[in-house]
Image (cartoon, helix red, strand yellow):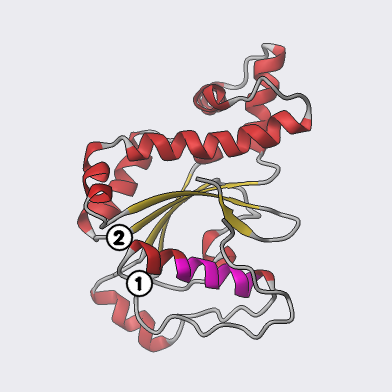
Amino acid sequence: MTLGTSSATAAPPAMATSTPRTPGEALRELAAGNRRWRTFQQGHPHETPYVRQSLASGQHPFAVVLGCIDSRVPPELVFDQGLGDLMTVRSAGGVLDEAVLGSIAYGVLELGVPLILVLGHQSCGAVSAAVRADETGERLPRHIQYVADEIRPAIDHSRHGDARIDSTITRNVGMIRTRLAAEPDLADRVGTGKLAIVGARYELHSQRVHTIT
């Protein structure tokens, strides 16, 4: 499944006029935003003085995006969203720890966010480092080693070279999504249809986001 399929010559779709409230609406808005981004028709929404003032009294984001720290993949730009739209949580390789889990849970349980998107990306340096360390036995600096150890279970040993890294990027997203879906508080909301947890990848060459789980 791909988040959006319009060609570069298509007219930009209208931006959402109200905050998405269901998982499906939230996913469609991310798809529309990514379509605007990759076709160079960004709207840069929700940046006006009025919006800035209105957000001082509260927020109603429609998605939590768990992504990598990579400077080439800022979620607000990739999905053409503005102030108050997304809660973004970023760690190298999207690795989970208690702070990351607590941040995601806050968005869902306290603010009622209907969508968690786990966003991996092409040419992920954290995954590359984890694969190289696994292959060579090299010990990385202590905090980076923690990241590599968390990614290691996703390494695809059936492939080699760049194909191993690329496959591991996808598998890592799936592993993180599975872990999130197993969290009881999140699973309860998924079970009632109030929440969806979706895995996706951003391709640097095409700027396209596509779902993978």
* Position of residue 122 in the picture relative to residue 193 (left or right): right
- Residue 83 vs residue 27, the one in the foreground: 27
Asked if the residue at tag 1 contacts the one at tag 2, i.e. Cβ–Cβ closer than 8 Å, the answer is no
- Label 1 SS: loop
Could you tell which of marks 2 and 1 lies nearer the N-terminus?
1
Q: What's under tag 2, amino acid-wise?
A: Val
Instruction: From the top left corner, tell me how far across and down residue 186 is, in percent.
Output: 27, 45
Q: Residue at x 66, y 28 (%)?
A: 129
| Residue 95 visible | no
Q: What's under tag 1, amino acid-wise?
A: Pro
Q: Residue at x 39, y 84 (%)?
A: 17
* Position of residue 41 in the picture relative to residue 144 (left or right): right
Instruction: From the top left corner, tell me how far across and down residue 2 is, in percent.
Output: 59, 59
Above or below residue 183? Residue 135 is above
Q: Residue at x 38, y 41 (%)?
A: 100
Above or below residue 205? Residue 139 is above
Q: Which residue of the protein is positioned furthest toward the top in this rendering?
A: 137
Instruction: From the top left corner, tell me how far across and down residue 71 is, in percent.
Output: 63, 53
Instruction: From the top left corner, tell me how far across and down residue 139 is, in percent.
Output: 63, 15
Q: Which residue is mark 1?
A: 20
Res 77 quadrant in image: bottom right
Please give the range of residues in magenta: 28-37
Magenta part, dominant SS: helix
Q: Residue at x 31, y 66 (%)?
A: 22
Magenta residue check for 129: no
Q: Dot 1, how many residues are within 10 Å of its Cα: few (below 14), some (14-19), or many (20+)?
A: many
Q: Dot 2, how many residues are within 10 Å of its Cα: few (below 14), some (14-19), or many (20+)?
A: many
- Label 2 SS: loop
Q: Which residue is mark 2?
A: 113
